[in-house]
Image: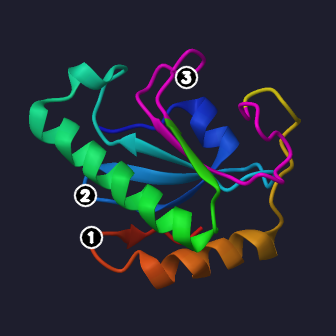
Amino acid sequence: MFALDSRLQQDTLTIGDFPLCRLLLSNDANYPWFILVPRRDDISELFQLDVADQQQLWQETTALAELLKDLFDADKLNVATLGNVVSQLHMHVIVRKRDDAAWPAPVWGKHPARPYNVEQVAAIRERLRLVLTEHFTFVEG
């Protein structure tokens, strides 16, 4: 049974599910920072996914990145899987803008997280509803 790592639970807001991955929003309003987590047990590395899941993860990551680039007018997208703190496999898709709080440095540890307010989260959900129309199920939260 799939269980989300407790650190991801505490630091993110659930948006919904692609066929493979749970889509989360990092609770840091400094950047539109999304996280894809494959709903598979005991996976910490990409190579531990079977080939079909590897391809599905990449398809979901690529589709999400493409949508976010347009939706948030990104100057650059940072896409990475690190897992040094949270070992559960997860893919970061972070919208970067030349005027964001950390540009051009990486976002990790640069500035304290600035939690979203209820209105900001609702606005992001509504923007996503306009573009995530196929193969995605929103979780109300």
- Closer to the camera in the image, 3 or 43: 43
- Three-letter code, disc 2: Pro
> Gap in Å between the C-alphas at discs 1 and 3?
27 Å
In the figure, 78 relative to 123: above or below?
above
Quarter containing the N terminus: top left
The quarter of the picture where residue 53 lies is: top left
Most common secondary structure along the magenta stretch: loop
Across and down, in percent, residue 59 comes to 26, 52
> Gap in Å between the C-alphas at discs 2 and 1?
6 Å
Q: Is residue 103 magenta?
A: yes
* Residue hosting label 2: 19
Q: Residues within 10 Å of mark 2 (few under 14, many from 20)?
A: some
For the residues bearing labels 2 and 1, Cβ distance under 8 angstroms = yes
* Residue hosting label 3: 86
Q: Residue at x 23, y 20 (%)?
A: 47
The quarter of the picture where residue 57 lies is: top left
What's drawn in magenta, residue-wise? 80-107
Q: Is residue 34 shown left or right of residue 59?
A: right
In the figure, 11 relative to 108: above or below?
below
- Three-letter code, disc 3: Val
Across and down, in percent, residue 116 comes to 80, 60
Quarter containing the C terminus: bottom right
Mark 2 or mark 1, which has the lower sequence index?
Answer: 2
Mark 1 or mark 3, which has the lower sequence index?
Answer: 3
> Gap in Å between the C-alphas at discs 3 and 2?
22 Å
Q: Residue at x 32, y 42 (%)?
A: 39
Q: Residue at x 88, y 35 (%)?
A: 111
Q: Residue at x 48, y 84 (%)?
A: 130
- Three-letter code, disc 1: His
Mark 3 or mark 2, which has the lower sequence index?
Answer: 2
For the residues bearing labels 3 and 2, Cβ distance under 8 angstroms = no
Q: Is residue 85 shown left or right of residue 91?
A: right
